[in-house]
Amino acid sequence: MSGGNSNLERYIESYIAEEKAHALPDGASARRVTPDAATAFIAQKGRELYWTLTRLAGFGHLHDGVWSFGQWNRALRKFLAEHSAGVAAPPGSRVFIEVSQLLRADKATGIQRVTLEVCRAALRHGGVPVFAFEGSLYGVIDTGKDARPIEVSQGDKYIVAGAWWATPGPVHRAMQDISARGGRNIVILYDLFPLQYNEICFRVENFVAWFNRIVLASDAVVCISRSVADEFIELMAAERRPFNPALRLGWQGLGADFSGGTEKPSREVVALCGEGAPLLLSVSTLEPRKGYPIALDAFDKLWREGVDVRYVIVGREGWMVSALKQRILSHPEYGRRLFWLSNASDADLRHLYGRAHSLVFATIAEGFGLALVEAAYYGLPAIVTDIPVFREIAGDSVRYFDLGDSDMLARRIGEALAAPKTPPAIPLTSWEEATDRLLAMIASEAYQYGELRERIAAIEPAEGRPS
């Protein structure tokens, strides 16, 4: 974990202790088992051999769609085909978007949502959704039994927009082939949390492999905020990891609008948004980084003081949340003034955004904070942790509280309830606009920070590092 913030360190230590106490029997000890590099390498090669042999034997469907063309999310493939421009760009100017992780997901949330929106917007310009397989790229829309790999040409660009927990091997080999043919590889970097807060993240080893083999081997990295780009530079300057010497670095924020089609909200959500006490909302996966214990402490304080307010959590169950889950489900206010919607639809979320009093975002770290701009799109005020990325996005238009300080959060909630509901003045960008800017940056190679090695060299003297 990166140091320098005592509140952050105390929160993480307390969270881990609570999870261990809840998950383990009395007297049991917990020990994190991390395989060494050699063991991890052998295990990965074993998995790849198994996948290859079973595919050749005709059992590719056993891998949940990793290798079997016919097992992809058919509804999503149909959607992509319907939204395709129908006219592909000529070889040498094509944009390929890696979407294999999105195709395996049953729901587009978080990173999958970003990938879907980027892909949706790129399709208007002839973008091609693809997945990497055995060192080649295959088109998602036209894939069938007789599918053939795409012939990459000089000048083509491959955007790796998917999640880091994917197996890096196929993507890495595809990147090598693209580089050999004169193409460009671009990675979208969402955050560095598994390297910064490895105690509370999952699949850390996968992220390290992805980061070293994919991110650092790319021709360009586009972060989802300037804050992430700055953290990336600091990490690389401090750790001296080897990277592509020509790697370039920039950033592009995310879109605020999202579509839910013609779907209507559930009866449960409509009823919840009816008459009653003011409703405050949090939107994100239940996992340690999101700071839900901080928010719950704040609402417990308000409820003890007689404040009649409801708190709705929207987010699926993540990792390391045994104690948190039990706290929510056994809470005396659960079902009365505390609610958890673990499978809300986009229509549900739109309905909540439009009718809640304020968004509560108690996270300890974010790469961007998609819920903040989505809430602002619906005019929803926000109460958020005072972290750099929120200052970058929201300026002074939201209420801030100190990281980990539930008492200050409770005060900010009280202030918000006593004040008129005023939409935050956050500059909003649609997904179409955000993706257009992303594609224009990639096409012109006009990355804000230019070459990574130059940025690192520029900050080394100020930090006392040898040149």
Image: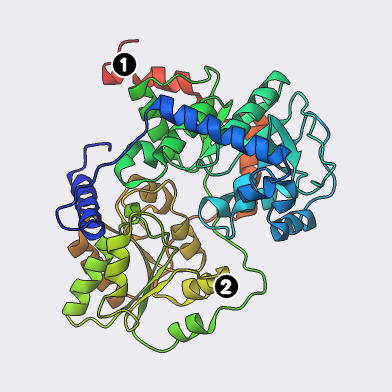
Amino acid, disc 2: Ala
Extreme residue toward the front, this view: 57
Q: Residue 103: where, in percent of width, then height?
A: 64, 51
Q: Is residue 229 above or below residue 7?
A: above
The residue singled out by tag 2 in the image is: 347
Left or right of 74, for residue 231: left
Left or right of 195, for residue 112: right
Q: Which quarter of the rendered picture does the N terminus lie within?
A: top left
| Residue in view at x 64 percent, y 34 percent | 442
1 or 2: mark nearer the eye: 2
| Residue in view at x 44 percent, y 64 percent | 315
Query: Dot 1: what SS?
Result: helix
| Residue in view at x 23 percent, y 68 percent | 298
Q: Which mark is residue 188?
A: none
Q: Is residue 198 above or below residue 343?
A: above
Q: Residue 393: where, in percent of width, then height?
A: 43, 50
| Residue in view at x 50 percent, y 61 percent | 374
Extreme residue toward the bottom, this view: 275
Left or right of 152, for residue 287: left
Amino acid, disc 1: Pro
User: Does residue 464 show up?
Assistant: yes
Q: Residue 416: where, in percent of width, then height?
A: 30, 71
Q: Which quarter of the rendered picture does the C terminus lie within?
A: top left
User: Does residue 186 show up?
Assistant: no
- The residue closer to the viewer here, 5 or 402, is 5
- Residue 199 lies in quadrant: top left
Query: Dot 2: what SS?
Result: helix
Q: Residue 62: where, in percent of width, then height?
A: 64, 49
- Give the crowd class for mark 1: few <14, some 14-19, many >=20 residues within 10 Å: few
The residue singled out by tag 1 in the image is: 461
